[in-house]
Image (tube, rainbow, N blue to C red):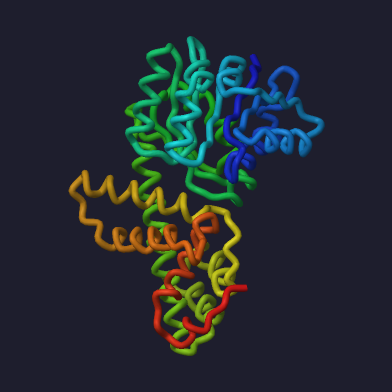
Amino acid sequence: MSSPVGFIGLGIMGEGMAARLLSEGVAGTDESPLIVWNRTKSKCEALKKKFPEKTIVIKDTPKEVVTESGVTYSMLSTPEASKDVFEGDNGVLAGVGEGKSIVDCATLAEADMVRMDKFVSEKGGRFLEAPVSGSKGPAHQGSLIFLCAGSNALFDEIKDNGLKAMGKASHFFQTTVGHGTRAKLVVNSLMGTMLAAFGEGLALSEGMGLDPNKMIEIIGQGAIQSPMFNLKGPKMVKGDHAPNFPLKHAHKDMALACDMAKAAGVEYSVMNTAEKLFRGAREDKDLNVSDEDFSAVFETIHKESTSDFSKKRKRK
């Protein structure tokens, strides 16, 4: 039997994910409307305008979304935002009760996921930790990768509808919440480290008088080829860092991963160095790239370089 589907958080990622639930027929009918809430209400209204033929209900509080939905997906940007939205007087947890299911797709600290699972379970609900690998483009294309832990029964119920509509793969680790976040932090810290190293390689190419676009082509033909390098490289050379995955969020994930590695006693010096580079980019008030794509770490690499090319480089 169909039931309303909730979605909380229509930002860079959430908007595309919610759109996939609508376009793939998981929600948006009279029997199974999509019930949405976002801190900026205009984003809810924009989604409704984009899908005029679909049944989309906008609520004033997260509590109302959960109360009226069977399964509610949440995609919030930071641990701070998640805590406010979940634990406020009219937040997510205020609406949880018997028969309610929460699927949290954000990248948070493991302790945040564990705390939310405890709260939801104590109120008789089910909780699935489901952070995603992928950014704005994959969210709109339905090619995210879900990294899940928590309620196995809930995972089984949504893997072939909701998760399939939004992603190209879903992985279930175990019923102990936290393992999905661990996997996500490994992925994102490796991604950030790869991009930092790639940026240094491009800067070195430019500093040595090599055509960076030719070097991107060469890198793409060998053993170190990467879809990320092919996608980001030409934009980095042009200074185009329109946000798909904001640098401030990439740094947040890398910092969490470094803390995780330290607690686990795992050697992590290469990624620690990359995290410091991203932190410098995030905190640099002159560059002001915190809200730009995480590829903007390239601008910090040039700023810290003393080559003639780096000194003369101007962003377009």
Is 1 left, or right, of 278 in this rendering? right
Image coordinates for residue 37, horizontal then vertical, percent: 62, 28
- Relative to 234, is 18 above or below? above
Is 253 left, or right, of 91 in this rendering? left
- Relative to 46, is 124 above or below? above
Instruction: Using the rendered image of the protein, determine whether residue 24 is visible from the camera's viewpoint.
Output: no
Which residue occupies the extreme left position in the image?
Answer: 265
Occupied quadrant, residue 275 = bottom left
Instruction: Using the rendered image of the protein, determine whether residue 19 is visible from the camera's viewpoint.
Output: yes
Image coordinates for residue 146, horizontal then vertical, percent: 48, 39
Task: Tell which of 37 and 290 is nearer to you.
Answer: 290
Quadrant assignment for the N terminus: top right
Task: Tell which of 205 and 226 is nearer to you.
Answer: 205
Occupied quadrant, residue 171 = top left
Tell me what residue is drawn at x 60 percent, y 23 percent.
Answer: 61
- Relative to 136, is 43 above or below? above
- Relative to 230, is 211 above or below? below
Is 221 left, or right, of 255 in this rendering? right
